[in-house]
Amino acid sequence: MSLTDIKSKTLQELKDGFATAGLPVFHALQVYCWLSRGVHGFDEMSDLPKSLRKKLASENYIASADIERKYCSKLDDTVKYLFRMNDGQLVESVLMHYKHGRTICISSQVGCKMNCSFCATGKSGYSRDLTASEMLAQVQSAQADAGVRISNVVLMGMGEPLNNYANVLRFLDIVSSKEGMNIGMRHISLSTCGIVDKIYDLAEKKYQLTLSVSLHAPNDEIRSRLMPVNRRWNVEELLKACRFYIKQTGRRISFEYALIGGVNDSYGCAHELAHCLKGMLCHVNLIPVNPVKGTPYRKSTPEKTHQFLRILCDEGITTTVRRTLGADIDASCGQLRRRYEEEAANV
């Protein structure tokens, strides 16, 4: 008999299951609370009868994210984790410290299908989706290791969240549950490279999270070179979906824009981007691109970055430059896992 992934269940699903099995429903809340605390085994659920713990262990498993490697930045408080899932697959998470609290950037897939040319994750290919419980386990493991409460979650690690839509929505419902980790939707950001049909679906949910859209170019010619997804949904279609999302949710969208020297950082690109976004409830986050082995891309110069920023701001587009964290520990997604796999292959 295959075991059930109990940590991916919502509280209501647990209650329904207990009721169907003829078990006291109040035990379901106890189990849910224990799972939200990040326990590794049913024996840790000390306020449950031993007979119930034994029954649960015989029918279910608890997903974990065990620390395989950990790197602490000497430049700031950033910590990068390489987590091993129950089946041995490896994913990355990054814990960051801001004035408003601790933020964790988690993975939603093992690898990624999108193959963006500047991203390290895509170079390793795609293995599988992560379950809701495996996303939750990343948050819990980092929180337990750091000994601090994590107050903000960003789905911007390995993978495309909207390509794992059902599991991501289940994770959002569980992590924001008041009976669980209670991380409110306004403290959660979800990043997408532009899966347009799922942006429309997500808009209908009216979640109050922050949607971050990886734009990285103001036109189809450049974006299609950088991001194959643009050949399926072009810039015009993507921005139309974004406007619908804003209308449905009332939430501001954050556009991620990795500045790549000589590719998308010209002053013409800045003016074109400002024209595309004019009048939208949005924010542009300029990102100094991370050098990735096997690609020719380099960061824009500080002068080009400053001028790009100034042009957008002068056009009325709220724009900031992302603060670089964990530069000495390869804190951008995909780099640690790739390095680990290369080292293992050379042993």
Image (cartoon, rainbow, N blue to C red):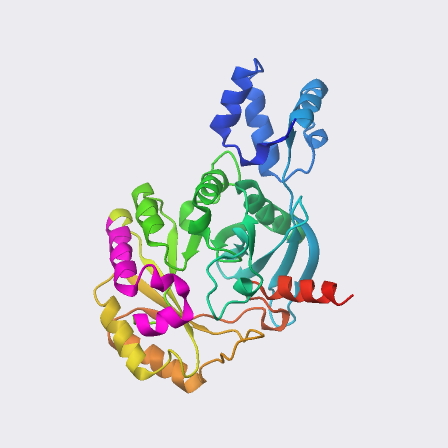
Numbered range of the magenta stretch:
220-247
Q: Position of residue 252 (x, y in %)?
A: 31, 57
List the single residue furthest toward the front. Answer: 231
**Residue 146 left/right relative to 153:** right
**Magenta span includes 139:** no
Q: Is residue 21 above or below residue 168?
A: above
Which residue shows up at 24% across the image and 62% down it? 280
Which of 250 and 83 lies nearest the eye of the viewer?
83
Quadrant in which the C terminus is drawn: bottom right
Q: Where is residue 222 in the image (x, y as percent from the top left)?
A: 35, 74
**Residue 63 left/right relative to 290:** right
Which residue shows up at 27% across the image and 59% down it? 237
Q: In this view, does 324 lie above or below 81?
A: below
Quadrant in which the N terminus is drawn: top right
List the single residue furthest toward the top. Answer: 22
Q: In this view, does 107 lie above or below 333?
A: above
Q: Is residue 57 above or below residue 268?
A: above
Q: Where is residue 343 in the image (x, y as percent from the top left)?
A: 72, 66
Which residue shows up at 59% across the image and 49% down it? 138
Assign the magenta stretch its main secondary structure.
Answer: helix
